[in-house]
Amino acid sequence: LSGVTVKIKNPKRLTMKELLKISPLGVIGVFIAGICSSTVFTIAPVYAIENGFTVSQVATYMTAIIAGGLFLQVPFGFISDRLGRRPAILIVSALIIIFSNLCIVVGSDPWLLYPTLFVWGGGILTVYSIAMAHANDHVESDQYVSVSASLILVSGIGSFAGPFIVTIMMQIFGMNAFYLSIAATYAIFFIATVWRTIVRDAVPAEDRVQSINMPQRATPYVARVIKDEWDKDDVANDG
């Protein structure tokens, strides 16, 4: 490979303060996604065991949640691209609130609980991608890497705080506070989204970036690769 030159484009930097001013809802969404997804992965098995689930039932319990996150990314992403980020956030948040309460109501009946967990988990594990897309809608393409780096930090802070806070709530209010804490968190997000919809116009459909199903631990390099691919597509379409 001697003599081969690799051309690397330097992305524009965007401070956290600037990002909060440009897209506060995107930052809030990623923070909430960090809180709730880490809570699910750390507290859900404990909740299941405390409610008398066997080891195999705990495995199925977690599989239903993860499967929802896998298979519902595409339909929720489609809604996000077609209807807009805020309508998608409102729909997903409402589903999470409803299905959080349904998880309590159906109890341990597997025929009812696992499909409920599928939708519940699909909503929780999809919010990060929608919030990331919402933030990227408000910045230039050469700022995607900086946005990704900032939002990974925000998600990490949420991931650290979530299990700690929910554990305290469970000790005070009982085991069902696991579901209710997540429902309450998304109720706050729902209200914040309604407020932002009132005070600020949405980004026009033609100016939105394509929704990408990104894991919460994706590095800024992934954002750079995606940006480069989009730039190639733009050049090809212009040609």
Image (tube, rainbow, N blue to C red):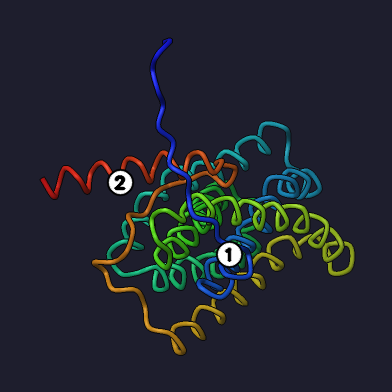
Looking at the image, is mark 1 or mark 2 earlier in the sequence?
1
The residue under label 1 is 102
Q: Nearer the viewer, residue 3 or 8?
A: 3
Residue at 51% in and 73% down: 22
Residue 175 relative to residue 101: left or right: right
Q: Nearer the viewer, residue 93 or 158?
A: 158
Q: Quadrant of residue 34?
A: bottom right
Q: Quadrant of residue 87?
A: bottom left
Q: Nearer the viewer, residue 28 or 72?
A: 28
Could you say which disc has been placed on residue 136 in the image? none
Three-letter amino acid code at disc 1? Answer: Leu
Q: Residues within 10 Å of mark 1 (few under 14, many from 20)?
A: some
Residue 205 relative to residue 199: left or right: left
Return the x and y of residue 46 as percentages of the image width and height: 78, 45
Return the x and y of residue 150 as percentages of the image width and height: 61, 56
For the N terminus, the quadrant is: top left
Q: Considering the numbered disc 1 on the image, is that residue within a helix, a strand or a loop?
A: helix
For the C terminus, the quadrant is: top left
Image position of 228 with respect to 157: above or below: above
Return the x and y of residue 166 as percentages of the image width and height: 79, 61
Q: How many dots with numbers? A: 2
Report, in whole angstroms, how far the alpha carbon at label 1 lies from the one at label 2: 41 Å
Residue that lies at the very extreme toward the top in this rendered image:
2
Q: Residues within 10 Å of mark 2 (few under 14, many from 20)?
A: some
Q: Point out the frontmost of discs 1 and 2.
A: 2
Residue at 46% in and 42% down: 70
The residue under label 2 is 230
Three-letter amino acid code at disc 2? Answer: Trp
